[in-house]
Image (tube, rainbow, N blue to C red):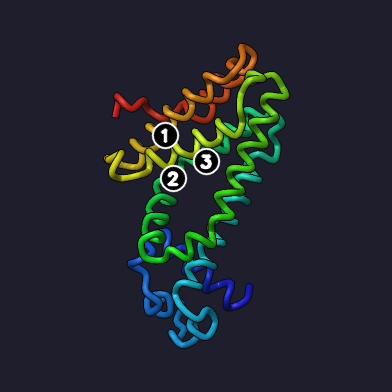
Amino acid sequence: MTQKDIIVEHAMKMFVAQGIKAVRMDDIAQELSISKRTLYELFGDKEELLYQSMLLYAQQNKSRRTRQIAELNDPLEIMLLSIRDMIEGAPTVSRMHRNMKRFYPRVVEKLHCDDVYEIQNLKKWLNYCVAKGYMTETSDCDFVVNIISQSVQGIMLPETFEARNSLELLSAMSYSLIIFIRGLCTVEGIEVFDRCYRCYFGNIPAPNTL
């Protein structure tokens, strides 16, 4: 790894753990025992370092999901596992996204391609599910993906959902999205869905038990 790669990876971990606004260039330089001048020579400003760090964060998430689904063949199982992974990361992603939107809006605009990537992936697996007979042929994949996306964004907004903790947020997102998706399944799809749900969501308590 180059010095720049090491800095980006370390900064990414600091931004995720401590918060985007809280981490200063001085803090990163001190943690890595380098001068702040070196940081500015390599990245120009904090905004560029933040952008590179968030790109790495997104790339690592994609790589992890690719490894998770590598040995799976069933499109519905792959889709549910991917959704589970997205939901688990939602509290952290939501916090970082709100701070970036407030303090670094240009970074949010530059990272928009990652949102497009997630939507395209969901559409792909939904289409496979329809083709395999797991979901009704009348399912409008564009509409379904839009509903899923809007549901996730709506639940993550603090003014519409005051989550007591990450587990409550995870539970609410799981039930709202999964119930909706199950309603689109055929009889054959429901059998596969229920099996996968027990495997990937069975350890999440119901909202009324929290």
Residue tagged 3: 85
Q: Position of residue 45 (x, y in %)?
A: 46, 78
Quarter of the figure with the N terminus: bottom right
Q: Give the CA distance from mark 2 to mark 1.
A: 9 Å
Q: In the rendered structure, which amino acid carries the disc numbered 3?
A: Asp
In the image, 82 versus 180, the foreground residue is: 180
In the image, 49 versus 145, the foreground residue is: 145
Quarter of the figure with the C terminus: top left
Q: Position of residue 106 (x, y in %)?
A: 47, 65
3 or 2: tag closer to the N-terminus: 3
The answer to whether residue 3 is above or below residue 160 is: below
Number of other residues with Cα within 10 Å of mark 1, as a class: few under 14, some 14 to 19, many 20 or more:
many
Q: Give the CA distance from mark 3 to mark 1.
A: 12 Å
Location of residue 157 (image quadrant): top left
13 to the left or right of 59: left
Location of residue 90 (image quadrant): top left
Q: In the rendered structure, which amino acid carries the disc numbered 1?
A: Met
Q: In the rendered structure, which amino acid carries the disc numbered 2?
A: Ala
Secondary-structure class at tag 1: helix
Residue tagged 1: 173
Q: Position of residue 7 (x, y in %)?
A: 52, 73
48 to the left or right of 73: left
Residue shown at 36% from the left, 61% from the top: 102
132 to the left or right of 170: right
Number of other residues with Cα within 10 Å of mark 3, as a class: few under 14, some 14 to 19, many 20 or more:
some
Instruction: Say which mark, if any, is on residue 90.
Output: 2
Q: Give the CA distance from mark 3 to mark 2.
A: 9 Å
Is residue 162 visible from the viewing direction of this image?
A: yes
Instruction: Say which mark, if any, is on residue 150.
Output: none
Number of other residues with Cα within 10 Å of mark 2, as a class: few under 14, some 14 to 19, many 20 or more:
many
Mark 2 in CB contact with mark 1 (< 8 angstroms) = yes
Residue shown at 50% from the left, 73% from the top: 48
